[in-house]
Image: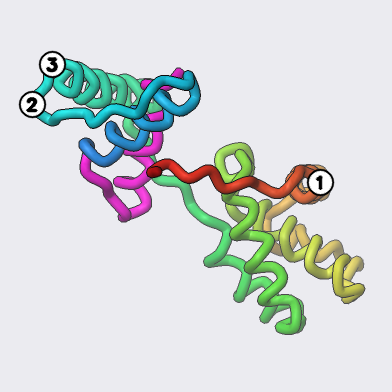
């Protein structure tokens, strides 16, 4: 699991156009492992056999991840739909709230479970509920945007669960 987690972070950095060097990923995950297992934090020499093995594992695991995903790595984010949807619904006052919810949705699995249009409709709906802004119901507004009510409700449920979790705690990696 530790190898897969490190490879996922490394691959995610590449996919989101914020790549990190493999040695930085290895150093951080090595340090986290030392801290988690209450071991003394040791410097990992880039010329050591251990570093070489960790780097080889990182690369090999990344290849396995890519193979399992069928090399399909593009995930469409809901953000690009929000402005258009709110302009169509004539509710520009919801833009910031919907955008914030879309940002927070990236901390969940919504972007891989639903089409971006459904996630965008879900965050628009959640923003409208928070600000008590009525949305057209005849015909249902979401049908125009290629979404279904069940998907929107699930998006809202996942976001509500996300907000019910305790606030994340910062754990310093370097000491």
**Color style of the picture:** rainbow
- In the rendered image, which quarter contains the N terminus? top left
- Give the Cα distance between marks 3 and 1: 44 Å
- Residue 71: quarter of image: top left
Closer to the eye: label 3 or 1: 3
Q: Going from the N terminus, do you reach mark 1 or mark 2 first?
A: 2
Q: Position of residue 108 (x, y in %)?
A: 63, 42
Q: Going from the N terminus, do you reach mark 3 or mark 1 first?
A: 3
* Residue denoted by label 2: 47
- C-beta proximity under 8 Å, tags 3 and 1: no
Disc sitting over residue 49 in the figure: 3
Residue 21 relative to residue 129: left or right:
left
- Give the Cα distance between marks 1 and 2: 45 Å
Residue 143 relative to residue 33: left or right:
right
Which segment is the magenta one?
Answer: 1-21
Under circle 1, the secondary element is helix
* Residue denoted by label 1: 164
Tell me if residue 4 can be seen: no
């Amino acid at each position: 699991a530790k190898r897969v987690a490190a490879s996922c972070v490394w691959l995610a950095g590449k996919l989101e156009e914020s790549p990190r060097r493999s040695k930085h990923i290895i150093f951080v995950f090595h340090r986290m492992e030392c801290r988690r297992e209450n071991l003394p934090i040791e410097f990992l020499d880039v010329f050591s056999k251990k570093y070489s093995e960790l780097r080889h594992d990182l690369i090999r695991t990344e290849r396995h991840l890519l193979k399992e995903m069928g090399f399909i790595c593009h995930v469409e984010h809901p953000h690009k739909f929000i402005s258009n949807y709110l302009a169509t619904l004539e509710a520009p006052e919801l833009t910031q709230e919907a955008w914030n919810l879309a940002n927070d949705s990236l901390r969940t699995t919504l972007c891989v479970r639903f089409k971006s249009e459904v996630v965008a409709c879900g965050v628009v709906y959640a923003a409208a509920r928070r600000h008590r802004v009525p949305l057209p119901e005849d015909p249902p507004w979401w049908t125009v945007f290629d979404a279904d009510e069940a998907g929107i409700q699930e998006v809202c449920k996942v976001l509500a669960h996300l907000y019910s979790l305790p606030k994340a705690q910062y754990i310093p990696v370097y000491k």
